[in-house]
Image (cartoon, grey):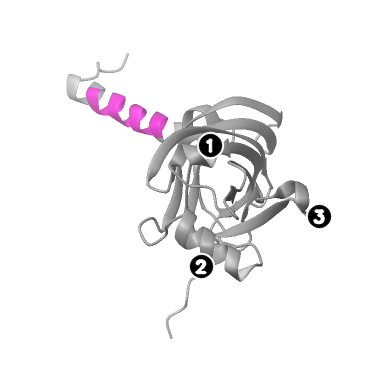
Amino acid sequence: MGRPLSRRTIVITLLLAALNFSAAAHAGVIHLPIDTQTSQISATVQLPLARMRDQPTTTGTFEIITGEVDGDPDNLAATGHVSIVIDATTYNSGNDMRDRHVIHSALQTFNFTAISFESTRIEDIKVEAPGALGTATVVGNLTLHGVTREMSLPVNLSMSPDGIFEARGEITFDYTDFAITPPSLFFVPAGKNVDVEFDIRAERPSTPTPTQSP
């Protein structure tokens, strides 16, 4: 029979076991920077005098400054987190006069240059293919025009075998809740609701090839 373990040896053994368990529990967590070039965000609103127009709505796009998706694809409820920052000054509907009015008068970007979303939890996760495909509701804080409100975003999620993450969804809300005054034409305001569609893509950073010293 072997010698009994000392108290010091037992403590060290338990500490190493705890560290190994912690590392295993977080082994599946990934950190993916959002691809600002391929991700897309658009906002559609009803134009003033919409009933008199052939095209009653207009759609503008925004550019993303930065963002990140974190989490374990097999345990999104406990580990999932999304952050994104949008450049409010990049609104582009294809009409210069309208864009200037939205950027300067409605969004007042001279005071509020950025729009941000920071998730607080992920709910209603339904997995169709473990670690690859599913749906969820991302709950978080949207800061727009200097006002922060909690929003729930239904999303379709996918993760390719080579580490490309994609989240697609759509949400409609009343933008006057963020203290934004609807643009108007001949004193007739645009619609108060905005329909936001998003296609967010993030990719695992490629490992740089080590350089050989001469």
Comes first in the chain, label 2 or label 3: 3
Residue 54 numbered mark, or none: 3
Sequence order check: which comes first, mark 1 or mark 3?
3
In the image: residue 125, left or right of residue 209: right
Q: Which amino acid does label 1 sit on?
A: Asp
Name the front one of labels 1 and 3.
Answer: 3
Discs 2/3, front: 3
Q: In which quarter of the image is the N terminus?
A: top left
Is residue 17 one of those drawn in magenta?
yes
Q: Dot 2: what SS?
A: loop
Identify the residue at image location x=24%, y=19%: 5
Is 202 placed left or right of 149 in the picture? right
Mark 2 sits on what residue? 208
Write down the region rendered in magenta: 11-22
Between the residue at mark 1 and the residue at mark 3, the CA separation in whole angstroms equals 47 Å
Q: Which residue is drawn at 42% across and 59% down?
A: 109
- Secondary structure mainly formed by the magenta segment: helix
Neighbourhood count class around disc 1 (C-alpha, 10 Å): few under 14, some 14–19, many 20 upward:
some
Q: Which of 192 and 85 is in front in this view?
A: 192
Q: Which amino acid does label 3 sit on?
A: Asp
From mark 2 to mark 1, how far is it between C-alphas? 23 Å
- Quarter of the figure that contains the C terminus: bottom left
Q: Residue visible at 30% across and 17% down?
A: 2
- Quarter of the image where one finds residue 8: top left
Q: Residues within 10 Å of mark 3 (few under 14, many from 20)?
A: few
Is 33 inside the magenta-drawn segment?
no
User: Relative to 97, is 174 above or below?
Assistant: above
Please name the residue that numbered disc 1 is placed on.
Answer: 72
Residue sitting at the far front: 186
